[in-house]
Amino acid sequence: MGTSAEAWDLVVVGAGPAGAATAVGALAEHPAMRVLMLDRSDFPRDKSCGDGIAPQALDALATVGAGDVVDDWTPLRDLELSHGEVRVAGPMDRPARVVPRKVFDARLVERAVAAGATLRRHRVTSLTTSPLLVSGDIAASVVVGADGAHSLVRQTLLGRGRDSRALAIRGYAPTTPELRGRQVIRYGDRRQPSYAWAFDRGDGLLNVGYGELLPREGERREPPSRAVLLEQLEVLIPGAASSGSGWRGHHLPLSSWLWRQPDGPVLLAGDAAGLVNPMTGEGIYYAVATGILAGRTAARTVLSGRSDDAGAAHRRDVRRLLAQHLRHTWLAARLARSPLVVDAGIRAAARDRRVFDTLVALGLGDGLIHPRLAGGLLGGLVRR
Ligand SMILES: Cc1cc2nc3c(=O)[nH]c(=O)nc-3n(C[C@H](O)[C@H](O)[C@H](O)COP(=O)(O)OP(=O)(O)OC[C@H]3O[C@@H](n4cnc5c(N)ncnc54)[C@H](O)[C@@H]3O)c2cc1C
């Protein structure tokens, strides 16, 4: 380490939901911890997203005193899932909220700063592990990589992966009477998962968008252009693309059967950890839940002088929380690559309220494939 290095207990790379939750989690565990959050953007900043905040994300934030962060935004219960003429609609067990990321992320950052974290605008350019240095001269006992889908920390730790990725675009359009108070998801006929959505923010605007699975490396298929994404959105939700603006696209690193976290003092959280629901593209719940776990682990290991144990502890905690759910969503997403299975799932959810609730929990946060859903899928396929 050079003499000019500054030293922190915890350096968090990225101050999106995963990074801010990391800082809040660390400071909830150990209020005197010296925490530095680095982000290349100033806050408030926009982020391409459907803006759907699952109740599970707010439950996780409640464990660190931040469950009320979007209480003033309208709760939404009505959900429609459809594929062509096959459709189910009804109230979800618990409401979600649709909050622009410009608002949600800035409020979480404010909570982290109020708890004692330092926020600095800085683009991280490198990470070395012995000694642990960020951008050459910022020393840390633990580093958490919460730097999103194209994470430099993840690449330094694990190399360039061949994970499955989706590409999605979102914009904002005026709320129409048909879509007021609702979350609508319409599956397309391109490579699954592919769907368009319209989520009412409750303030006169809809978050609208469309996304689909990208070709894997070496696959002979072109990724969809912006024009194709917008065209698909307009086909599935007429009027959404033509009346929308503020278009912004981004990759989604879809989670797989396996989840990797190496030993040592560098932890991964959120999109940087490759945690996006492969059925629905939801990632905010995973980001805040794994951020809080990473922050708490960082605080405990720094306090006990054993920061090298942080990676193993984080791996164990995240697996305990998510491993079974991730395996189930991975399986459900694989099955849902067949339009027949998508239709069977929607029909089963239309027949049986508990299947509907199971599908929502699988897609939003922590659900598992319930025997009734498996039975409904099989029944639907056999009937076909
Ligand atoms: C179109 C679209 C729709 C989506 N819809 C939903 C939805 O409705 N609900 C849902 O739950 N999820 C949704 N997701 C997924 C969700 O957006 C992500 O899972 C979520 O943003 C992950 O949070 P994060 O904190 O891990 O990463 P991010 O929110 O991406 O934050 C990463 C931060 O790191 C910073 N950063 C990156 N590199 C560096 C660097 N080198 N140095 C310093 N800072 C850096 C960035 O500026 C950024 O602020 C959607 C994604 C897309 C693309």
Image (spheres, rainbow, N blue to C red):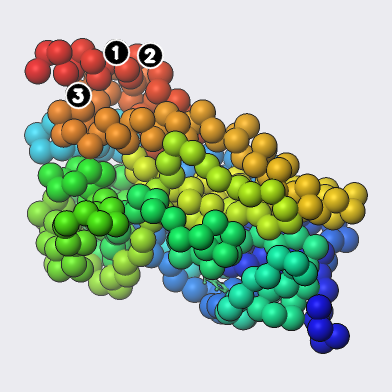
Kindly tell me whether mark 2's CB lies below 8 Å from ligand 1: no
Which type of secondary structure does the marked residue at label 1 adopt?
Answer: helix
Residue wearing tag 2: 371
Residue 362, how many percent across, how many down? 41, 32
Amino acid bearing label 1: Gly
Q: Nearer the viewer, residue 294 or 352?
A: 294
Which mark is on residue 375?
1
Q: Which residue is mark 3?
A: 344
CB contact under 8 Å: marks 1 and 2: yes
Q: Quadrant of the N terminus?
A: bottom right
Quadrant hosting residue 105: bottom right
Which of the marked residues, 3 or 2, is nearer the chain's N terminus?
3
Q: Residue at position x 17%, y 56% from top? A: 220
Residue 31 appears at what percent x and percent y? 85, 57
Locate the C terminus and report the quarter of the image it occupies. Answer: top left
Residue for point 47% across, 43% down: 54
Tag 1: Cα neighbours inside 10 Å, few (<14), some, or many (≥20)? some
| Residue 314 picture quarter | top right
- C-alpha gap between disc 3 and disc 2: 14 Å
